[in-house]
Amino acid sequence: MTSTASGSSAPLPAGLPDPEAGARVVADDRAHLFHSWAAQGAVNPMPVAGGEGRHFWDYEGRRYLDFSSQFINLNIGHAHPKVVAAIKDQADRICMIASTFANDRRGEAARLIAEIAPGDLNRVFFTNGGAEANEHAVRMARIHTGRPKVLSAYRSYHGGTATAISLTGDPRRWANENSGSASGNVAHFFGPYLYRSHFHATTEAEECERALAHLEQVITFEGPSTIAAIVLETVVGTAGILVPPPGYLAGVRELCDRYGILYIADEVMSGFGRTGAWFAVDHWGVTPDLITFAKGVNSGYVPLGGVILSDAVHDTFRDVAYPGGLTYSGHPLACAAAVGTITAMREEGVNENAARVGAEVIGPGLREIAERHPSVGEVRGLGVFWAVELVRDRETREMLVPYAAGGELARPVDEVVAACKEGGMWPVYNYNRIHVVPPCTITDEEAREGLAILDQALYAADKYVG
């Protein structure tokens, strides 16, 4: 048997290694595929032959512990047998039926999602992913309120479609604005981020109070009567895994109520177990007007996203047609995967596992790592949703690589990432941060294995300190 990079003794499927097959996969990719968020000449993808549980492997026979959950969406892990079986069962009965018909799995998926949503969020509009979910949530809010403007945070990512990229605060917005691809009518504000406070706060309470005062000031200057919604990632994902301080989300809810603004919670990344709860808002007992979701609802086995609507927003369209729809809204295979996923998560205690592993293994493990490495400025997170922020100087908090850096400027983090992969752990990173985001099903042993690999990899960052 071929030895594996991560040290796992699990056998590889028959027929591997097969480097020639891997070379053919890459050849087809480079000859015909156009990759997202990339300069096409710089793309050099690794061909993946398969995956199971918390691991995937290439055609060379190298096995990797998936600490990225792919696009932070594979919450239930690779090839979960109950979800695969649900898709196969649905495919045997009917693969496609238009959304104008009632379908058993479509209706069941909507019911299950509504049951776990907070408050009176009782209706589900299905999309194909998170960006479309945010597009439609904003459209619903604008029509419901009769107002055009939307507020969102600078440190955020809401998707790559026209409205969603306008909502996005991170640098991917810039080129889209330059090209005219963004839709506009969005204003941005600073959310809470105590480690790099914009408000000169020194405690979570100060950060919360001052961030809310800032948000109200933005509302005042933008004009409350013009603002349809505030769109907020409950726990900021790609832009930093920023956990809101106690009271912040309740404060946002109060501001929205005071000014007649809808509160849209973007739970595309943070929902369905990622934080150890069905939805991240559950940790703070807050009920938004709309929740957007995707990713973990079925771990991307078949593309699916959606918007969960409050009764009040739903009633806006009771007698007036909603001006939007998608050919594949509520696709039967995707909804069957969602039913299989939610059912398996309940039966196997997946949310509880994510919460426990985060509290007992990942959090303590990362804090121990931080003590050993001067390049670690802060670790933060909950559930299986953590960030390791890397710095050149702990006193000044200078970022290890600058904001929006690429090329040679990003080399220090690139070296950490390369060391993780060499050790058999596949990480995810964003500028000066390594994100620790394994599947919600990860075991204690696997979590410790991944953290040990990260621990060794961070010596590559330490040499840039001082």
Image: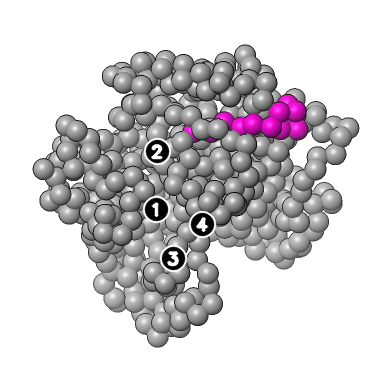
Quarter that holds the N terminus: bottom left
Cα separation between marks 2 and 1: 13 Å
Tell me the tag on residue 241: 2
Q: Label 3 amino acid?
A: Ala
Q: Earlier in the sequence, mark 1 or mark 4?
A: 1
Q: Earlier in the sequence, mark 2 or mark 1?
A: 1
Q: Look at discs 4 and 3 and give the one toward the viewer.
A: 3
Cα separation between marks 2 and 3: 26 Å
Cα separation between marks 4 and 3: 34 Å
**Crowd band around label 3 with a 10 angstrom C-alpha radius: few (<14), some (14–19), many (20+):** few
Q: Label 4 amino acid?
A: His
Could you tell me which residue is drawn at 79 percent across and 58 percent down? 97
Residue 327 against residue 167 in the figure, above or below: below
**Crowd band around label 2 with a 10 angstrom C-alpha radius: few (<14), some (14–19), many (20+):** many
Residue denoted by label 1: 68
Q: Label 1 amino acid?
A: Ser
Q: Label 2 amino acid?
A: Ile
From the viewer's side, name the closer residue of 237 and 217.
Answer: 217
Q: Which span is picked out in magenta?
A: 142-153
Quadrant of residue 21 in the image? bottom left
Q: Which of marks 4 and 3 is nearer the N terminus?
A: 3
Residue denoted by label 4: 80
Which element carries disc 4, helix, strand or loop?
A: loop
Question: Could you say where residue 422 lies in the image, as x and y percent from the top left?
Answer: 25, 64
Q: Is residue 55 in sight in this rendering?
A: yes
Residue denoted by label 3: 39
Q: Which of marks 2 and 3 is nearer the N terminus?
A: 3
